[in-house]
Amino acid sequence: MSEVKIYYKQNRQLYLQKGEDEYEIQVKKCFPWTHPLEYLSLRDVEDTEVYLVENFTQLDPESRKNLASYLDKSDYIHEIVKVVDVIEDVELRNYKIATKGGERSIQTRLDDWPSLQDDGGVIIQDLNGDLFRIPIPEELDENSRELLSTYIS
């Protein structure tokens, strides 16, 4: 993968140099989230994939360092401690939740279902790409478990 370089510019944005082409990029993780350093989609400002990193270790050391720095800054996952309500609307599912940081509302598309993880936790990705995690669904209060029962098995 020596033809690919990932670096920051003075504007503090992440860039990809691929051959003669240069792209300002953002990184989106592809499924499965249980392997956070595999299958990273590098996307340009128009959200078009310009490169797929299949395995982080295949990058040169400087590119790995820059990509790791980006992921560290963007990898915050909110922990859900309570589900207040779930309402389905036209093409959207609206969640009212409580996180360790307070109450908030998030939305997903109706076809985007919460993802059950290998460790038994549940991940919900909202329309903005933010991740919300329920570490142990069985430990939620009864009302939260009942509201989620339709969406996770």
Image (tube, rainbow, N blue to C red):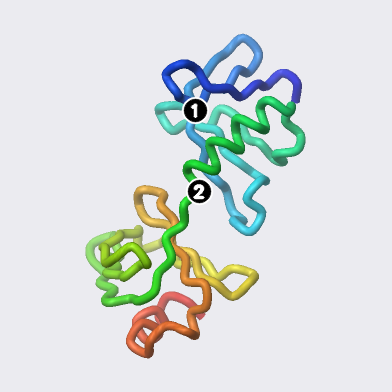
Question: CA separation, marks 2 and 1?
Answer: 16 Å
Splitting the image into 4 quarters, where does residue 17 fall? Answer: top right
The residue under label 1 is which amino acid type?
Ile
The residue under label 2 is which amino acid type?
Asp
Front-lying residue, 18 or 79: 79
For the N terminus, give its image quadrant.
top right
Drawn side of residue 27 relative to residue 82, left or right: right
Residue at 66% across, 27% down: 63
The residue sitting at the front extreme is 101
The residue sitting at the bottom extreme is 142
Splitting the image into 4 quarters, where does residue 65 fall? Answer: top right
Figure disc tally: 2
Drawn side of residue 134 relative to residue 126, left or right: right
Residue corresponding to mark 2: 75
Q: Point out residue 125 in the picture as x, y percentages from the top left corner.
A: 43, 57
Element under label 1?
loop
In the displayed structure, 144 sits above or below 64; it is: below
Q: Point out residue 55 in the picture as x, y percentages from the top left corner.
A: 72, 41
In the displayed structure, 119 sits above or below 52; it is: below
Drawn side of residue 13 relative to residue 37, left or right: left
Residue at 27% across, 69% down: 96
Residue at 67% across, 22% down: 4
User: Local crowd at mark 2 within 10 Å, few (<14), some, or many (≥20)?
Assistant: some
Residue corresponding to mark 1: 25
| Marks 2 & 1, CB-CB < 8 Å contact | no
User: Local crowd at mark 1 within 10 Å, few (<14), some, or many (≥20)?
Assistant: many
| Foreground label between 2 and 1 | 2
Element under label 2?
loop
In the displayed structure, 127 sits above or below 47; it is: below
**Disc on the earlier residue, 2 or 1:** 1
Q: Point out residue 36 in the picture as x, y percentages from the top left corner.
A: 63, 50
Q: Point out residue 29 in the picture as x, y percentages from the top left corner.
A: 55, 46
